[in-house]
């Protein structure tokens, strides 16, 4: 099953992710894709709020993996930790295995930026989230997407595609994540 959401601000993207974060449990795997600056880390920050984990989620690019512990005095005490991975520099599934995500998977929600074709073997089920910064301008270029190169701090529209794969997500409807 798949769902699509459109946001016009980074805050809206975080709101969708926060709502999703409240549905997640230990063992869940999320695979995020989208070009640099598309909003993968921004989305993960929202997940962290919904999960009730320690704040301060930043791009893990130079660290590869960061663990954000669940906050005992947060909104979701006893809930899972957040393991935030950037797989951009990890070439293969074998290199992923070297960082031992299996160890933390059972007690955490594992979110992998650039994880496509690298981490699917870690779990029987997963959510795939694609963030697209294309702003369709059907008026002038029918059938084509126009890309927006304004400053990265400016709010822009994003298309968020969510695909739910595997038995964990059977029958789960994500339509209620949408923002107005
Ligand atoms: N609708 C939107 N959703 C997400 N991010 C947005 C949006 N509009 C603008 N942005 C900005 O785009 C940038 C996304 O950066 P980041 O989340 O680090 O991307 P990535 O991790 O995919 O490289 C941020 O500066 C964010 O404020
Ligand atoms: Mg990032």
Image: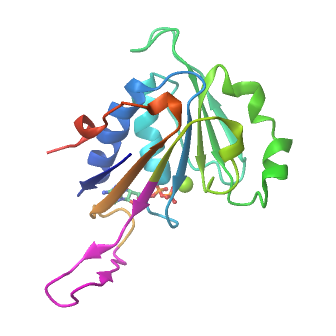
In the displayed structure, would residue 114 be above or below residue 45? below
Q: Is residue 103 magenta?
A: no
Q: Does the magenta stretch include residue 146?
A: yes
26 horizontally vs 62: left or right: left
Pinpoint residue 174: horizontal percent, then vertical percent.
Answer: 31, 37
Residue at image point 36% right, 31% down:
172
Between 101 and 172, the one nearer to me in the picture: 172
In the displayed structure, would residue 80 be above or below residue 64? above
> How would you classify the magenta stretch by its main secondary structure?
loop
Pinpoint residue 40: horizontal percent, then vertical percent.
Answer: 48, 52
> Magenta span covers which residues?
130-150
Q: Quadrant of the N terminus?
A: top left
Res. 144 image quadrant: bottom left
Pinpoint residue 112: horizontal percent, then vertical percent.
Answer: 61, 46
In the displayed structure, would residue 170 be above or below residue 80? below
Which scheme is used to colour this image of the protein? Answer: rainbow
């Amino acid at each position: 099953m798949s769902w699509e959401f459109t946001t016009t601000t980074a805050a809206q993207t975080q709101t969708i992710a926060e709502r999703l974060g409240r549905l997640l449990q230990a063992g869940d795997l999320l695979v995020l894709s989208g070009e640099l600056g598309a909003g993968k880390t921004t989305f993960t920050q929202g997940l962290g709020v919904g999960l009730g984990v320690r704040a301060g989620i930043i791009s893990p690019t130079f660290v590869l993996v960061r663990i954000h512990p669940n906050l005992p005095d947060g909104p979701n005490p006893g809930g899972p930790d957040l393991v935030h991975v950037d797989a951009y520099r990890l070439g293969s599934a074998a290199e992923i295995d070297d960082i031992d995500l299996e160890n933390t998977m059972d007690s955490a929600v594992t979110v992998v930026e650039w994880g496509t074709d690298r981490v699917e073997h870690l779990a029987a089920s997963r959510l795939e989230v694609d963030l697209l910064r294309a702003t369709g301008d059907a008026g002038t270029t029918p059938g084509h997407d126009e890309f927006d190169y304004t400053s990265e701090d400016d709010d822009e529209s994003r298309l968020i595609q969510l695909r739910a794969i595997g038995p964990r997500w059977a029958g789960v409807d994500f339509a209620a994540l949408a923002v107005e």
